[in-house]
């Protein structure tokens, strides 16, 4: 799709605005489940842009309905949360043609591109060619957010979502397959005691370490790509105390449902083994992301080609088709065609040294407008 001159004129007029908007947005703290400040900023920005019917739902999704949304709808979203737990303003700096800030690419730059696209639609009072369109700045995509925002969206529009597009991550890949995962909080409790007087009592840290060793001894299934990870360990009281309690956060993920089942079986067998030793082992499922379901191949192919073409047109390279864990997991698991693509160039996602190439923002606006305007005449 070649962008019309009036669209290109609009994009060129927004270049400085996009950079300024990103620098403001990226500073606003937005841990998963606590995106209210960023959501309120986006809502106010949209209303000033002419999207008077935009609103925030109970899941902290900012939703701008376009056209008749009483029937089927298409969805274009970008998640507002970042992986960092900061509750104060996030640190931002600019140097050597780059903007540095935790979460600036994943996913502030994509939110910026979607907001600029939404303003074009609102200012020109565009109506989708068919059905309705939901432009959504959604919540809780990262980590233990567990895709809360998208789950709420799919619940509210059950059976009516025809296609789903997510702006997330950079320009390197288009995500077309869902990587499912299970995430657990695992706790071990023992009698503990004084490190000298109680020597010989069982130590929760030791048994947690042993459990981790057992889980890491497993060979992952050969089907698809499967991984596992212990990401957080906590426990103990002091250097001279035999730990009574220790816990970890553990996940396993795969792009194949059968592999997830195998990993689940191994996890449960490991827990059972340690319980037979008389150890108290408690676990809680804190994250559950599904793999892809049965999606119509032709519709999925057409949507993928739209996304790939937009990236090629404006970033001048062929993005890799890859599996991933994104907001698309939920619609894909329900058989809804869904793809995820990025609207910026940069590196360091999920690190505090993340950066965005400033000159890529202009290209990203073109990608966002091309993909979004595909639903209009």
Image: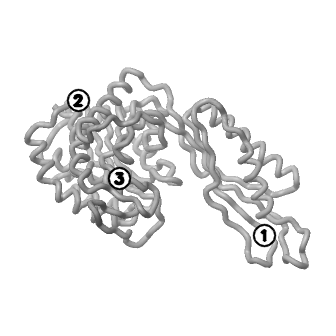
As helix, strand or loop, the secondary structure at mark 3 comes to strand
Give the side of residue 291 with respect to residue 79, left or right.
right
Give the side of residue 331 with respect to residue 129, left or right.
right
Disc 1 crowd, CA 10 A, few/some/many (<14, 14-19, 20+): many
Q: Quadrant of the C terminus?
A: top left
Which of labels 2 and 3 is toward the front?
3
Q: Quadrant of the N terminus?
A: top left
Give the side of residue 277 with respect to residue 292, left or right.
right
Q: Say whether disc 2 or disc 1 marks the residue closer to the N-terminus.
A: 2
| Labelled disc at residue 189 | none
Residue at (42% x, 58% y) in the render: 82
Residue 109 point in image, percent of width and height? 31, 54
Q: Is any atom of residue 69 visible in this view? A: no
CB of mark 2 within 8 Å of CB of mark 1?
Answer: no
Give the side of residue 374 with respect to residue 295, left or right.
left
Q: Say whether disc 2 or disc 3 marks the residue closer to the N-terminus.
A: 2
Residue 141 point in image, percent of width and height? 45, 50
As helix, strand or loop, the secondary structure at mark 2 comes to loop
Which of labels 2 and 1 is toward the front?
1
Identify residue for label 1.
243
Determine the CA span between mark 2 and mark 1.
Answer: 62 Å
| Labelled disc at residue 130 | 2
| Labelled disc at residue 346 | 3
């Amino acid at each position: 799709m070649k962008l019309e001159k009036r669209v290109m004129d609009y994009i060129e007029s927004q270049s400085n605005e996009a950079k300024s908007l990103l620098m403001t947005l990226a500073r606003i703290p937005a841990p998963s489940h606590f995106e209210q400040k960023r959501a309120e900023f986006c809502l106010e920005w949209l209303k000033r842009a002419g999207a008077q019917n935009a609103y925030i739902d109970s899941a902290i999704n900012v939703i701008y309905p376009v056209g008749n949304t009483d029937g089927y709808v298409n969805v274009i979203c970008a998640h507002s949360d970042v992986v960092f737990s900061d509750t104060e303003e996030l640190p931002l700096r600019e140097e050597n043609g780059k903007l540095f800030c935790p979460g600036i690419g994943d996913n502030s730059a994509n939110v910026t591109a979607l907001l600029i696209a939404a303003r074009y639609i609102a200012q020109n009072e565009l109506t989708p060619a068919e059905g309705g369109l939901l432009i959504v700045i959604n919540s809780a995509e990262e980590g233990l957010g567990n895709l809360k925002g998208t789950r709420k969206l799919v619940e509210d529009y059950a059976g009516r979502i025809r296609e789903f597009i997510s702006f997330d991550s950079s320009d390197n890949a288009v995500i077309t397959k869902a990587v499912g995962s299970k995430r657990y909080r695992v706790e071990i409790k023992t009698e503990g005691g004084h490190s000298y007087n109680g020597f010989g009592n069982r130590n929760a840290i030791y048994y947690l370490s042993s459990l981790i060793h057992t889980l890491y001894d497993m060979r992952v299934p050969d089907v698809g790509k499967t991984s596992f990870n212990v990401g957080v360990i906590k426990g103990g009281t002091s250097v001279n105390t035999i730990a009574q309690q220790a816990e970890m956060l553990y996940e396993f993920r795969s792009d194949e449902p059968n592999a997830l089942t195998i990993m689940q079986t191994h996890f449960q067998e490991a827990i059972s083994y340690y319980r037979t030793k008389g150890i108290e082992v408690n676990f809680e499922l804190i994250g559950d992301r599904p793999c892809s379901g049965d999606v119509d191949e032709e519709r999925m192919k057409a949507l993928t080609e739209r996304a790939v073409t937009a990236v090629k047109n404006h970033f001048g390279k062929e993005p890799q088709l890859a599996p991933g864990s994104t907001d698309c997991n939920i619609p894909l698991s329900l058989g809804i065609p869904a793809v995820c693509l990025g609207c910026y160039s940069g590196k360091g996602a999920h690190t505090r040294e993340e950066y965005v190439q400033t000159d890529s923002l202009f290209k990203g606006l073109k990608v966002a407008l091309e993909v979004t305007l595909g639903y209009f005449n």
